[in-house]
Image (spheres, rainbow, N blue to C red):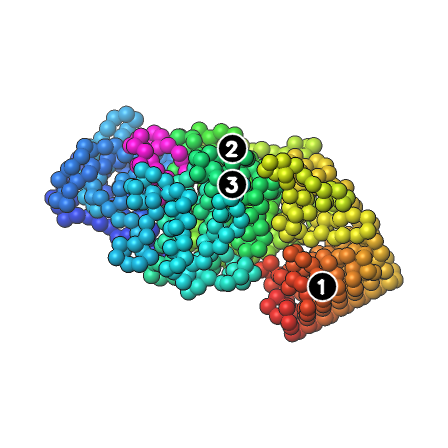
Amino acid sequence: MRHQRPLAIAVATLLTLTLTTAPTPANAQSAAAPNQVTNLTIRQADGYATLAWQPVDGATDYQIERTAVDATGTPTGAPTIVGIWRPNRQINQQAPTFADAGFNPGDTFQWRVRARAGTTEQPYSDPVVATTTAPWGNPDTPGEQLRTQWETAHAAQYTSDTDEYAYTAAIDALSDRVRVVELGRTVQNRPINMLVIGYPTPATTPEAVAATAPVAINCNVHGNEPGDREACLIMARQLAFSTDPRITDLLSHTTVLIVPTINGDGRANNTRGNSTGQDLNRDYSLIRQPETAAYIKMVRDYRPVAGYDGHEFGNSRAGDLPMLPPRHQNVAQPIFDQSQDMIEGHMYTKGAEAGWWACPYGCEGGGNVGLSEETILRNTLGLKNVANSLLELRSSGGQTRPDEGNTANNRRRKTYSALWTFHQFLDYHRADRNDILTSRAESIEIQAANTGRLVFRGSRPIPAHPAPHPGDSPPPLDAPRADLILDNAPCAYKLTDEQYNGARTDGPGGVGTTVAQRIAAHGWQVIKTNDGYYVPLNQPERGLIPLLLDTQGVEKLTDGERVYPTLTGRRNGPLTVTGFTCAADATINGPVTVQPGAALVATATTISGPVSANRAAGVVLADSTVNGPLQITTTNAISIIDVTIAGPASLTGNTTGTTAALLAGNTIRGPLNCTANSTAPTNLGVANTVHGPRTNQCAAL
């Protein structure tokens, strides 16, 4: 796990407000009886109240009682046990807290807490009366006055698709911070919208947004799990209009990308899958459906560096907020570590302060969950070098929230716990932005180096957090089987024209996009030669490529041919590349010329001399050294990652289509010039070190 640190940012009034204690006789502290809870305090926040108290020796759990009262503190309803605190809820046992949620925001209540020793109930604390926080936004201020259908119905109804579109369009119209863009359409032609939020205004192009190290929240992939979606819509209003310094500071240092409803058809029909019955969270690598293709293209173009993916979980014994990082073993270690730090180093700590029960997916009574399918978004994002987590909202209140037989109370608890999580996610990114970017850069270079085994299914272990938190059931080990491990990774995969461009039947209505279109959506470099299409592994998404193109792939697109290095060891004298040449762990003492229509792929290779390519099919170099200048002209596929170039580097007139030339993490001991390339080269947010001027299209790289 990466190091932990306290947040340097003050928590905003959106999340934690000052203690509200009504000056009524009920709040006067009496002399404590034996084993009576003392020092009960209440802090109000968006949709929940944090109760804290002095622990009682010998207590095995605590009961939280809530009673509706009027402005004078007179009860207007029956006292109700609304919460049970148990030791496995939080990491700090000496400072128990409970996030009470489910009430109608803005109402006034009395709370009491009592300890139990086994089943023996101890005396209640003295009561505390407080008024809860009303829904965010001044009803008299334009923009702030907006409310979702879920809010106006007091959680009796979820926000419909048409009301979502009207609500987000109104935010867009009233806030300079927000731009709503359409990423695509569902099978039934519903728009898949994304809110792009920045301060004072969001960047105007995907590439410019990518330069801000954006974060992405996917709110509703399973249509019958809408709690996160409602939280996203509320948070969008807060981010769009709040004057809180925390919010403006966050948005000044990143761009927030919110996709409220990727599965609009499923949400409209309240089904888990989309209108074809496809579970979209089993399709992010294969992208057979238009919804998942739209999201993956967004990841390619906007390049979020961190993400959260919202779900609901049917295990009533689990925590409030089960979370899980990208576990697939092909995910680079720095991304896994960073994701775990976000969960265990931040969410567990902040959950203990706020009273939410954050835990690993599975939690108490967990089952066979959180496995290694690369088709799941958290794994796909991890394989794309994005630090991220799945978020589950426990679907029912269970034993720890016994008042949630009331449907509205249950819905409010889920939504406001998600709202807390997403705000904490933004705080984590703000505090750990540099670490996140470092982890991403390290992972891109690790992947491009094409070293180590490949696993087709298998997860990293998630050890149980030190007792007594978070319970007895971390996710299962899910170790890879021997037949799903490839120790000798190839240099590239070769596809025939039929495999690459042929029609497919795995999409809606038996019509699927081609492998070529899906690879382009992922953003991989592809080298076309006279004898086929080559997909090199020495590029940033190395861990994902074999899962889709290798014969051992469990859920693959096609059976690509493994291509192994053709040049290793020492070679003296000039090298003229014709056809497809793959160099690995090689030393080439002389100049290298890549002929028209030919391709050079090199990893862990030293070239003592200049490298030039003119009208080549492709040049893909990683983890290598060029002792001389590098000149690439009129070439179709280019990726230069973690390469030391002892001289000038020049990219001129190259046509790479929708997949931009990559220049990332290189050291160039001379000038860098990029001119008339279509499209402009990118560094993926991993800066190059250049000992000379950077000009034209590479001025910012």
Which x, y percent locates residue 592? 82, 62
Q: Earlier in the sequence, mark 1 or mark 3?
A: 3
Is 413 colored magenta in this rendering?
yes
Relative horizontal placement of residue 347, taking residue 517 as reference (left or right) = left
Inspect the magenta stretch and tell me whether residue 251 lies in it.
Answer: no
Mark found first going from the N terminus, 1 or 2: 2
Spatial CA distance of label 1 from label 3 is: 39 Å
Residue assigned mark 3: 188
Query: Is 50 placed left or right of 267 in the picture?
Result: left
| Chain part drawn in magenta | 392-421
- Residue 59 in the image: above or below residue 383: above
Residue 679 higher or lower than 452, as above or below: below
What is the distance, in whole Å, between disc 1 and disc 2 at their CAs?
A: 46 Å
Location of mark 1 (residue)? 654
Determine the residue located farthest toward the right in the rendered image: 573
Q: What kind of residue is marked 2?
A: Val
What crowding class fits label 3: few (fewer than 14 Cα within 10 Å), some (14-19), or many (20 or more)?
Answer: few
> Decide: marks 1, 3 in contact (CB < 8 A)?
no
Relative image position of residue 652 (x, y in whole percent): 72, 67
Q: Is residue 81 visible?
A: yes
User: Which label was assigned to residue 369?
Assistant: 2
Three-letter code, disc 3: Gln
Q: Nearer the viewer, mark 1 or mark 2?
A: 1
Instruction: Identify the residue at horizontal 54%, vertical 59% (top origin).
Output: 206
Question: Is residue 645 something that shows in the picture?
Answer: no
Q: Residue 115, percent across and down?
A: 26, 33
